[in-house]
Amino acid sequence: QAQLVESGGGLVQAGGSLRLSCVASQRTFSGYAMGWFRQAPGKEREFVSAISWPGSATYYTDSVKGRFTISRDNAKNTVYLQMNNLKPEDTAVYYCAATSSFARRMAVAGVSGINYWGEGTLVTVSS
């Protein structure tokens, strides 16, 4: 069964940076748009960022624009999320996601239409 495995989470002070990675195993995600969602305690899972299969199109939720950058290396079956200038409100479990649909749909439709989820990695930002 296809797996998405996240890494790179941890504890960081406000203003710091982290880089999340998501490696796809058991199958290739050729043609799939990839993205990141997050879920804070007591809140619903929300869209963070998405990237198209070629990597030419990227999407971000407004609260992370200018601070987060999504990228992918298809040869390595890996998608990254570079997170800079982190804020306490960024604290959440971050989930990698893959969809056979378009990246824009991931940004618009949210959790619906996601074909694969990772287990999540915890990001904690202290003030």
Image (cartoon, helix red, strand yellow):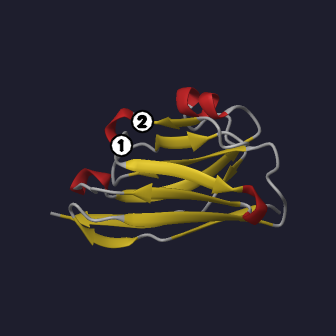
Q: What residue is shown at x 74% (from left), y 33% (from top)?
A: 101
The answer to which of 111 and 54 lies nearer the viewer is 54
Q: Position of residue 16 (x, y in %)?
A: 27, 65
Q: Quadrant of the C terminus?
A: bottom left
Quadrant in which residue 13 is drawn: bottom left
Q: Residue at the location (70% across, 31% down)?
A: 102
- Which mark identifies residue 64? 1
Q: Secondary structure at mark 2?
A: loop
Taking depth in this image into account, of 14 and 122 the one nearest to the observer is 14
Q: Which residue is mark 2?
A: 61
Residue 86 vs residue 1, the one in the foreground: 86
Q: Position of residue 89 (x, y in %)?
A: 25, 51
Q: CA distance from mark 2 to mark 1?
A: 6 Å
Whether residues under marks 2 and 1 lie with C-beta atoms below 8 angstroms apart, the answer is yes
| Left or right: 91 as drawn, with respect to 127 | right
Q: Residues within 10 Å of mark 2 (few under 14, many from 20)?
A: some
What residue is drawn where x is 33% and y is 57%?
84
Q: How many marks?
A: 2
In the image, residue 114 sits, relative to residue 17, either above or below, namely above
- Tell me the element at label 1: helix
